[in-house]
Image (cartoon, rainbow, N blue to C red):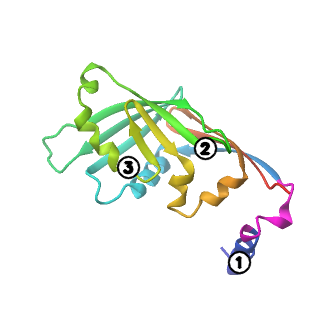
């Protein structure tokens, strides 16, 4: 990006985009499975016991997750399915909630799922729910301030793609 344009953008951001008051935008942003996994890989702390994690978006607002824990090649991968349980609501509850779909054997494997506690800040697991706190998750990347402009965010999936639908505005 041109340095001058970057500086102009930075000043507008600092002022709350005062010169763009009244602007509105609606964006549909498809995120491929490849890009999603690249972002996830960069977000996992190096100290986490996860050595392999792959998320595959599936039709119907579901994700297939495959993870390998620890360094032993003898440990089998863990396969999970997550479904979107609740969409974020701005500004009151900017949290995406996923439900862990557990089969009989997997529900007995609670201790094996401890790796999920090593997830990035802003993601926590409670029982069969995964809470994605968007402000906390974005704060670690200094991006949380952009959520001030978001009026609505929907996360949906089709095979191989996460589809983000975003409505945002600069209020004045």
Q: Which residue is mark 3?
A: 119
Q: Secondary structure at mark 2?
A: loop
Measure the alpha-carbon separation of dots 2 and 3.
18 Å
Q: Position of residue 125 (x, y in %)?
A: 39, 39
Q: Quadrant of residue 22?
A: bottom right
Q: Quadrant of residue 56?
A: top left
Residue 49 is a magenta residue: no
Q: Secondary structure at mark 1?
A: helix
Q: Which residue is mark 1?
A: 7
Q: Which residue is mark 2?
A: 94
Tell whether label 3 touches label 1 (CB within 8 Å). Answer: no
Q: Quadrant of residue 163?
A: top right
Counting other residues with Cα less than 10 Å from the Cα at mark 3, is it few (<14), some (14-19), or many (20 or more)?
A: some
Residue 19 is a magenta residue: yes
**Which residues lie in the magenta part?**
13-23
Measure the alpha-carbon separation of dots 1 and 3.
34 Å
Q: Earlier in the sequence, mark 1 or mark 3?
A: 1
């Amino acid at each position: 990006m041109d340095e001058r344009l970057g500086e102009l953008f930075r000043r507008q951001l600092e002022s709350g985009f005062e010169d763009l008051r009244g602007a509105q935008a609606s964006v549909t942003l498809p995120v491929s499975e490849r890009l999603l996994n690249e972002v996830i890989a960069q977000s996992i702390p190096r100290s986490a016991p996860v050595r392999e994690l792959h998320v595959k978006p599936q039709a119907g607002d579901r994700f297939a997750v495959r993870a390998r824990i620890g360094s032993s090649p003898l440990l089998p991968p863990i396969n999970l399915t997550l479904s979107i349980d609740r969409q974020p609501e701005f500004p009151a509850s900017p949290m995406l909630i996923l439900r862990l779909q557990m089969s009989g054997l997997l529900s007995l494997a609670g201790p094996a799922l401890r790796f999920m506690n090593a997830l990035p800040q802003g993601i926590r697991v409670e029982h069969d729910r995964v809470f994605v706190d968007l402000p906390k998750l974005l704060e670690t990347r200094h991006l949380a301030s952009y959520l001030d402009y978001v009026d609505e965010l929907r996360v949906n999936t089709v095979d191989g793609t996460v589809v983000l639908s975003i409505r945002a505005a600069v209020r004045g």
